[in-house]
Amino acid sequence: MIFDPIFERFSKDIGIDLGTANTLVYVKGKGIVINEPSVVAVNQRTKQILAIGSEARRMVGRTPSHIVATRPLVDGVISDFEVTEAMLRYFIDKVHNSTYTFLRRPRVVIGIPSGVTEVEKRAVQDAAINAGARQAFLIEEPMAASIGARLPVQDAQGSMIVDIGGGTSEIAVLSLGGVVISNSIRVAGDEMNENIVQYARDNFNLLIGPRSAEDVKIQIGSVYPLSETLHARLRGRDLISGLPKEVHVTDTHIREAISPSIRTIVNAIKNVVEETPPEIISDIMHRGIMLAGGGALLRGLDSLIHDETKILTVVADDPLTCVARGTGVVVEDLESLKDVLVTTNFERIPR
């Protein structure tokens, strides 16, 4: 385009990890500058957006009936197009807060789950363009996480990544800049939170919200017995009396609660390993399985996967930011890394 040199001068190319739970934004030349919850508060009467990100998350469960604090992404894909577009515009404007609005036309690289349909890809791309992006490129989250974890994805040797986010768990084997085999399951952090909510209801007659469940999961969650017992308090409403109630829980309770989700994720990992070509399995046994995403922080998860697969498993440095850092690496050198981007049926990637 004739105006591209002008836009390039005033815009900052960005990489976005558009997650179900959190959105991280990487700015070219600066690094990760935004890490906020993917939550938007909307006034249902006026359709006005009241808050986005951290401010909106504080409203969850505390709003009057006409105000809804919601996540516009469910299981890694867009469930509310207009709200997602508004959220992306908010983050793009926040990055360019000192630039004239009409000159904010960055190129954007967005991480998406590996199992999405062409329609879902188009929705993400359209939302980014409508939010102010000059060009929107897509990259599969396992590929972005692998690049962010500094795995040699462009070499002729296999690498395996397990990215456990909020809405999806992405398991992929990569080689020569492409995905050899992958599996995307909609069992991840949010499902574990629901497991804890249901466990509290069934075992303590206690009604808690997903946010309380997530807090206790972070505080004492584990998948293996620990050398020292961890304790936490759950506060909610007694389902029998209807009055406030507090119970003390240990890591054993939380481990039991999330075990169905953990078992599903481990079985999905084993299925990918079973389908991986023998030569690549040899590479993976040498290098190991890399864990990324917030789920990687669960205590003992690497040991459990190692015991189940007999393959060394390691947690990436700062697993929460792997996808965002991966999109950032691509943003910094878009021309030489364009082969790792997702090609779509509705638009060719410029070469």
Image (cartoon, rainbow, N blue to C red):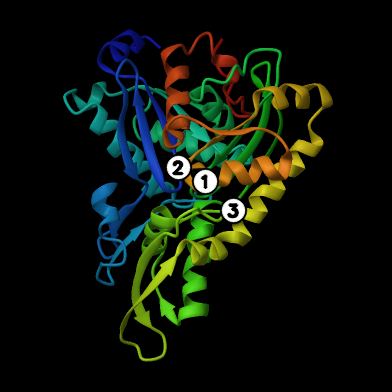
Q: In the displayed image of the protein, which residue is found farthest to the right?
A: 278
Q: CA distance from mark 2 to mark 3?
A: 14 Å
Residue 166 screen position, x and y as percent? 48, 49
Q: Which residue position is annotated with label 2?
A: 19
Q: Secondary structure at mark 2?
A: loop
Residue shown at 71% from the left, 49% from the top? 267
- Badge number at residue 76: 1
Q: In the displayed image of the protein, which residue is found farthest to the left?
A: 98
Q: Dots 2 and 1: beta carbons under 8 Å?
A: yes
Observer-side mark, 3 or 1, equals: 3
- Badge number at residue 187: 3
Q: Amino acid at mark 1?
A: Gly
Q: Amino acid at mark 2?
A: Gly
Residue shown at 37% from the left, 47% from the top? 38
Q: Nearer the viewer, residue 11 or 307?
A: 307
Residue shown at 27% from the left, 53% from the top? 56
Q: Residues within 10 Å of mark 3 (few under 14, many from 20)?
A: many
